[in-house]
Amino acid sequence: MIKNETEKETILIVDDTPDNLAVLGEMLMPHYQVRVANSGPKALTVAGTEPLPDLILLDVMMPEMDGYEVIKYLKDNPRTSDIPVIFITALDTCEDEAKGFDLGARDYISKPVRAPILLARVKGQLEIKTARDILRNQNNWLELEIQRRIRQYQKVQDISMRALASLAEARDDETGNHILRTQNYLKVLAEELAKHFKYADVLTKQTIEIYTKAAPLHDIGKVGIPDHVLYKPSKLTPEEWEIMKTHAQIGADAIRRAVGNEEDKDAVDFLYVAMDIAGFHHEKWDGSGYPKGLASNHIPLAARLMALTDVFDALISDRVYKSAYPMDVTIKIINEGRGTHFDPDIVDAFNRRVDDFENIAARYKEQQVPKDRK
């Protein structure tokens, strides 16, 4: 706490000799609030009691616990470690002073104490402490302010991502729950895969957060699909299916244009991941997917994770062209795609977290079946 101009600083005087306490007290009381302790243990008790002293004048030579022991305890206690200590002592060898400074003392005053010297040294140390406290408070405020701004920035990012994603979902008669489900599936899947030695260094906590943030944009490209294809309630013709498949590249290109020539790539790292997810989440492990026909590890990891979560959610959800599959059938289909449609490691991770997938599906269950498209 920074003292205001009218509030006196508190000085704790520690000495086992009553006369010394009286003399030092008389010198200081006109200028400061003075507290006293006549032993090391009492000094530790007083020093840790509110209001904490702003400075401690500490005698070195005391029975039971000398000044060196006292300062060790003071510096080891987070509540008292920053309180400046000035040794008051008759010891005047270089070795004695060096020992005190090594233990954290700020200054030495030799006995007998003269008032001008004492007041000047005390004032100097208190001014240093005040400056240090102001700097610490400013740094703490700046750190809190930076954290607040970062949280605001991240919240704006998240809201913007969901707003963009909702455009695609609205075009496809999906709901926001699909976004929440796939986002949570992906996070659970990535956290489980991170336990595998092959992915521990890649799937850090920060990377998983970026993947999770980018997941809602996986179908953003559907905004570019013509209505007669997107809203067709029956099976698509081969020509129409080719048009539908272009949504992956449309999404990736849209995000690429949004990123543009941004030089600070770290600031928009989630958009690069979103680009991978949008562009490649329909690729298959065996190379039979679209739009590029990528295979195995050539498919970005975020897209491989999204591929399983998107298919899982499609299988358990009602669509205008099908009813939801039972959970056991869905799990069976996912496992049948191991090594063909899906990365085997990701399927194995899914099998270890099936219960979490079921819980997420139940938590964000649709309130009603989507209406038939007109």
Image (spheres, grey):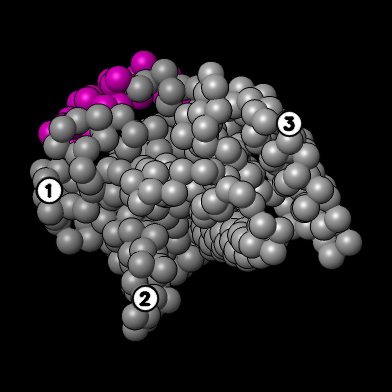
| Horizontal side of residue 244 vs 46, given as left or right | left
In the rendered image, the residue lying farthest to the right is 6
Residue at the spot 38% in from the left edge and 39% down from the top edge: 186
Nearer the observer, 301 or 23: 23
Q: Determine whether label 3 and label 2 are within 8 Å by CB.
A: no
Residue at the spot 46% in from the left edge and 43% down from the top edge: 91
User: x%, y% of residue 259?
Assistant: 39, 75
Pointer 2 or 1: first along the chain:
2
> In the rendered structure, does residue 234 fall within the stretch colored magenta?
no
Magenta region: which residues?
A: 324-352
Q: Which amino acid is tagged 1?
A: Asn
- Residue of label 1: 297
Query: Distance between the Cα atoms at labels 3 and 2?
Result: 67 Å
User: x%, y% of residue 336?
Assistant: 20, 26
User: x%, y% of residue 208?
Assistant: 36, 45
Callout 1 secondary element = helix
Query: Distance between the Cα atoms at labels 2 and 1?
Result: 27 Å
Callout 2 secondary element = loop
Q: Which amino acid is tagged 2?
A: Asp
Query: Relative to 252, does residue 10 appear above or below in the rendering?
Result: above
Disc 2: CA contacts within 10 A as few (<14), some (14-19) or many (>=20):
few
- Residue of label 2: 264
Pointer 3 or 2: first along the chain:
3
Single out the mark in the foreground, 1 or 3. 3
Mark drawn on residue 35: none
